[in-house]
Image: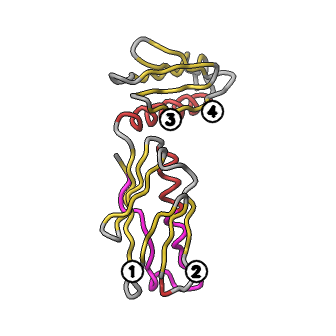
Amino acid sequence: MPRVANVSHEISLPEGIGATIEGGLVTLNKEGNSLSRNFTHNRVTIVEAEGGIKVHCSLPRRSEKAIAGTWAAHLRNMIKGLDEGFEYRLKAVFSHFPMTLKVEGNRFIITNMLGEKVPRVAKLPWTPSEVEVRIENKTDVMVSGADREKVGQTAANIEKACKVKKRDPRVFQDGVYITSKGA
């Protein structure tokens, strides 16, 4: 199979978003908010182009082509996060024992799940300025922020804390589950 001469992904920056590239560190800014990510590879480069950012690789191998596409997707997610933000919605589901949900500092506490005496705790590893976790209507949980990976990991931590062990998961379906992912 013949090699492609070059791979180039051009990502346009919307109005109000600025970009700085220093070495492999790309920083995007909008109204005081900023996201940074380090992109380093010896063959794939990121440069500023007119009105946006360009991910480029000359004579790429299959892996380098994949890396260029992945980096372009990361940059688009960073732009979308600064522009619109990401929000995951979770729902607490219970059949008999009513659960209570609380956010205390960097911990998400689930009390009375399946009638357990000891509350379950999910870690919230980022500050509320990076990822905001709020509870609405006692059973709905909203996780929102600009960084897609941090928002998704926080939602996964909450869902994982409610995993039912030593019981049939088809019968005991109590827990906090992700219902929607998106902007």
Q: Which of marks 1 and 4 is in front?
A: 1
Q: Earlier in the sequence, mark 2 or mark 4?
A: 4
The Cα–Cα distance between marks 2 and 3, rounded to whole angstroms, is: 35 Å
Residue that extends furthest to the right in the rendered view of this protein: 42
SS of the residue under disc 3: helix
Q: Nearer the viewer, mark 2 or mark 4?
A: 2
- The 10 Å Cα crowd at callout 1, few under 14, some 14 to 19, many 20 or more, is some
Q: Say what amino acid the circle numbered 4 marks.
A: Ser
Q: What stretch is highlighted in magenta?
A: 158-181
Q: Which residue in the protein does label 2 denote?
A: 165
Kind of residue sitting beneath label 2: Lys
Q: What element carries label 4?
A: helix
Mark 3: give few (<14), some (14-19) or many (20+) Cα within 10 Å: some
| Closest to the observer, 157 or 68 | 157
Q: Where is residue 138 in the image (x, y as percent from the top left)?
A: 34, 71
Q: Is residue 94 within the magenta segment?
A: no
Mark whose residue sits in front, 4 or 3: 3
Residue under label 1: 94
Provide the residue designation for mark 3.
74
Residue nearest the observer in this picture, 43 or 3: 43
Q: What residue type is labelled 1?
A: Phe
Q: How far apart are marks 1 and 2 (CA)?
A: 16 Å
